[in-house]
Image (cartoon, rainbow, N blue to C red):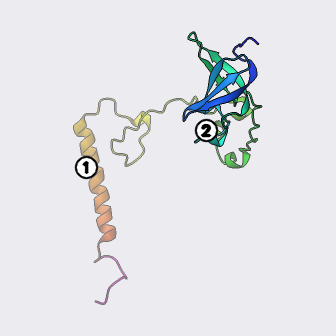
Amino acid sequence: MQLEVGSICEGKVTGITKFGAFVELESGKTGMVHISEVANTYVNDIKDHIQEGQTVKVKVMSIGEDGKIALSIKKALPQPERPQRNFSDRDKDRPQQFRGGQGGKPRFEKKSEPKREQSADPVGFGYVSPSDKPVDAAFEDMLSKFKASSEDKMSDLKRILDPKKRSGNRRGK
């Protein structure tokens, strides 16, 4: 029998190492099954899956120019069915663009909203619409506006928190 990449054949395990197993094929040639190609699950110890002298079905993965044959046991087996995943319960409260690409849509889609201009309010104390934005406001002007606004707010806070003007909540005096 002629060995070709992709062909499935049987062979006998002739040796086991920590990184794989050597399999003698029907043609008399020996190939190696890497530990990652032994089973569809994680393989910690190869001896838990195959033993020396065991006959196994393998798929020829590659044949090197130097004659080395790479084999796979897991690709010679039928692929295990993956359980159907139901995302509807998990995704019901999420926006459509983040629902895993359902309905042929990409998973993350960019929204094409026009960019908003940044507020002219330098410290974020109040909303200033883009039309109110000063064109050539100097830093000193902005700083004086901030100071005035800050002083107004501080005087309001002092008036509210002043214990002499507050009624009630007197502690035993």
Q: State which tag comes first along the sequence, 1 or 2.
A: 2
Identity of the residue drawn at 64% across and 45% down? 94
The dot on residue 147 is 1
Q: Position of residue 124 (x, y in %)?
A: 37, 46
Residues shaded magenta:
165-173
Q: Decide which of 166, 59 is in the foreground and name it.
A: 59
Disc 2 target residue: 46
Q: Is residue 156 above or below residue 132?
A: below
Amino acid carrying label 1: it is Lys
37 lies left or right of 151: right
Q: Residues within 10 Å of mark 2 (few under 14, many from 20)?
A: many
Q: Which image quadrant is residue 134 in?
A: top left
Kindly state the secondary structure of the residue where label 1 is placed.
helix
122 lies left or right of 107: left
Q: Main secondary structure of the magenta part?
A: loop
Kindly state the secondary structure of the residue where label 2 is placed.
helix
- Spatial CA span between label 1 and label 2: 75 Å
Q: Residues within 10 Å of mark 1 (few under 14, many from 20)?
A: few
Instruction: Tell which residue pokes out farthest to the bottom in this image.
Output: 172
Answer yes or no: is residue 24 visible.
yes
Q: Which image quadrant is residue 120 in?
A: top left
Identity of the residue drawn at 29% across and 76% down? 163
Identity of the residue drawn at 75% across and 21% down? 8
Q: Which image quadrant is residue 104 in?
A: top right
27 is within the stretch colored magenta: no
78 lies left or right of 34: right
Instruction: Tell which residue pokes out farthest to the left in this image.
Output: 140
Q: Position of residue 84 (x, y in %)?
A: 76, 41
